[in-house]
Amino acid sequence: MTEQHRETAIQTVKDILHVLHEKRYEDLPSCVDEMEWNDTEEIRECIQGTLDMNGFDAFDEYGVPCNFHPSYEYHHKVEFYEHSDGFDAEYDLTSGGEMVYLRLQLVFLYREDGLKRIFHTIDPQ
């Protein structure tokens, strides 16, 4: 994975977190090239339900300071897993600096014209 690929992946995570923070779930498809989980109403119900059930207001934007221990910077928490045709990126979602135990999972595939960005899922961890 090149530094440019890493930067593209992190920017994609930032874009998705911004949409989630503003609760504009219907705009998720504009952040990627393809949605594997493409029912944005189902996504809204699932993840908004998790926020509501746990007393959280909204997901944090990328880079918001955390309130949990051990403390770490969010840009260090994007985890990358390389495979022969690209890489996966995973990011733990937070709200108010607290873990909400949901993980954003993205797939990036190498293409001649750049990366194909795929929204895989937001999964409980």
Image (spheres, rainbow, N blue to C red):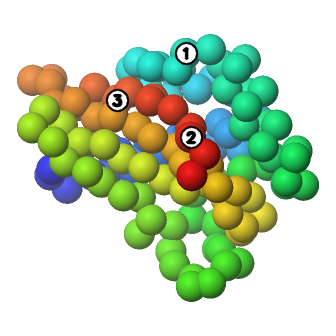
Which label lies toward us, 2 or 3? Answer: 2
Question: Which residue does the image show at 79% across and 37% down from the upper left?
Answer: 48
Residue under circle 1? 38
Q: Residues within 10 Å of mark 3 (few under 14, many from 20)?
A: many
Tell me the element at label 3. strand
The quadrant holding residue 16 is top right
Numbered mark located on residue 123 in the image: 2
Q: Earlier in the sequence, mark 1 or mark 3?
A: 1
Left or right? Give the position of 67 relative to 125: right
Q: Earlier in the sequence, mark 2 or mark 1?
A: 1
Residue topped by disc 3? 117
Question: Which circle, 1 or 3, is nearer the viewer?
Answer: 1
Residue 57 on image: x %, y %: 86, 51
**Picture coordinates of residue 83, whole percent (x, y):** 15, 42
Residue 24 appears in the figure: no
Farthest front residue in view? 125
Task: Give amino acid for label 2.
Answer: Asp
Q: Is residue 66 above or below residue 87?
A: below
Q: Is residue 96 left or right of residue 30?
A: right
Q: In this orientation, which residue lies closer to the viewer: 18 or 87?
A: 87
Q: Tell me where residue 9 sits by quadrant.
A: top left
Cα gap from disc 1 to disc 3, whole angstroms: 14 Å
Residue depicted at 56% across the width and 40% down the height: 123
Q: Identify the residue shown where x is 23% and y is 42%.
A: 87
What residue type is disc 3 on? Arg
Task: Please state which of the two labelled residues, at mark 2 or mark 1, is closer to the viewer.
Answer: 2
Q: Secondary structure at mark 1?
A: loop
Left or right of 119 on screen, residue 116: left
C-alpha span from label 2 to label 3:
18 Å
